[in-house]
Image: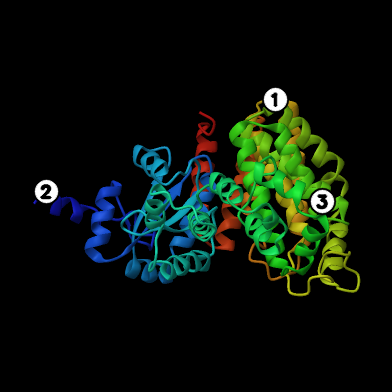
Amino acid sequence: MKTAISLILLLLTVPAFCQINFVRKSTWEEVSQLAQAEKKLIFIQLDDSGCNRCIEITTEAFTSIDLKEIFGRNFISVRVNMETEEGRKLGEKFEIKKGPVSLFADAHGNVLNRYTGAASAPFIYTEQADIALKRRTGKQLSDYVKEYKSGVRTPKFLEEYIVKRSQAGLSVTELLEIYTGALPLDSLSSFRVVKFIYLHGPSLDSKVYKAIQAVTPQKMIDSMYKTAPYQEAVAMNNAIISASMQKAVQKKDRELAGQTGYFIMRTYSPDFWQGRIASQRNMLRFLYEMKDTTQYITEATQFLDHTHMHLTADSLKRMDARLMNPAKAPAGTKAKHPGMPIIPQSQFFHMDLNEHAWHVFEMSSKIDDLERALKWSYQSQEFFNTLYKNTTHPMRLGNPAYIDTYAQLLYKLGRKEEAIEWQTKAVEAQKVAGGTSHESFETTLEKMKDGTLLK
């Protein structure tokens, strides 16, 4: 009876505003047992307290009634913070070191899909769930693990195993080296083989990548990119960048991070200005992950003060207009790839300003640093408000997250009354925009009024 009672207790859910029914205080064994009994898959949402906004964003998505129906019918759902004992154990089991991560698995622990990041749009999670449901049948990761341990090393098997691990968000670095090492040398002159390797992310310092650079004709690599569908070419670059940055962070290797930045810059050719911007963004992410406060603030200051703070909203609008107009688009953008989605470049500049202002708030208590971040934060709002003025954008009172950043910087600078005034605006802006995040902003507002925000 004890087991039966514990399984019943698993059905207790988090507060009613969360529409997906997340089970509580559950070990993997208990969840697996319940999933097998109900013939369902398992959805695990791993939160990271280092990103409270990510938690708010995903919670907003999970309030969808559509998600409740889809996930209730097909999944046993669990939501834990990675800093808890349960979260750490799940992270170890599925080789996850940092959230937020949305994981879809079967009852035997085979990962069917993995989504890294946070999204407020419910359809993102619907799409990820659909992918997992389509992969629930057929040969699973555990089957490949058994064959691999038994000594199977044929190229076909290794390719399938690499695909399975990639789908699960697991490292394929070792497998790529074994796969490449087992191939005849002339295989690295094959479009198909090199494309397969690139799509699965060899890091820039890996033996695999170096072997391709040494053996494969550059003309063939160039031709491979030119003939590949645009999305596939982007996927190859992103896989290499992601693997390289993960390794750079893991090894605290600034040289590799710099190599990755140079690789990023070259992917923007001939638009080297945008390439340099993207490369600098990458290096700042690396420094932030390294918690190198001094170097981060130094390079963020150079990046933003020399670029973003010299731009105007009108110049950002012109940048977007050139991208939207095929006749005026730079080579290598929309004119060259008519099927690609067009993403306004202006949004990245106000996002940069807010992101780095918030990071300075987190990392420093120096007045000069905070005053500089306050200017970045104010400029992010100016860009946002001007760009979306007189449009149908739901944030007509401003971007609440940007206002919140500005308010908290004011508070840390000791300007309490101004901070309360701006945080009140953040609450109102979020209420108008919709969603549930205003509750968090209200909590921050109350702590400001009580004088307990930074305690």
Q: Disc count in the image?
A: 3
- Name the secondary structure under disc 2: helix
Amino acid type of disc 1?
A: Lys
**Left or right side of 144 for 226:** right
Q: Nearer the viewer, mark 3 or mark 2?
A: 3
Q: Which residue position holds label 3?
A: 266
First in sequence: mark 1 vs mark 2: 2
Q: CA distance from mark 3 to mark 1?
A: 37 Å
**Label located before the other in sequence (3 or 2):** 2
Any part of residue 398 in sight: no
Q: Position of residue 121 (x, y in %)?
A: 54, 64
Give the side of residue 85 with respect to residue 442, left or right. Answer: left
Residue 444 image point, x, y percent:
52, 42
Amino acid at pointer 3 = Arg
Mark 3, mark 1: which one is toward the viewer? Answer: 3
Classify 10 Å Cα crowding around label 1: few (below 14), some (14-19), many (20 and above). few
> Residue 231's x, y, as percent?
69, 66
Q: CA distance from mark 3 to mark 2?
A: 61 Å
Q: Residue at x 64, y 54 (%)?
A: 184
Describe the element under mark 1 as helix, strand or loop: loop
Asked if labels 2 and 1 touch by Cβ distance under 8 angstroms, the answer is no
Reply above or below: 261 against 291: below
Disc 1 to disc 2, how far (Cα)?
Answer: 56 Å
Q: Identify residue type, mark 2.
A: Lys
* Image quadrant assignment for residue 7: bottom left
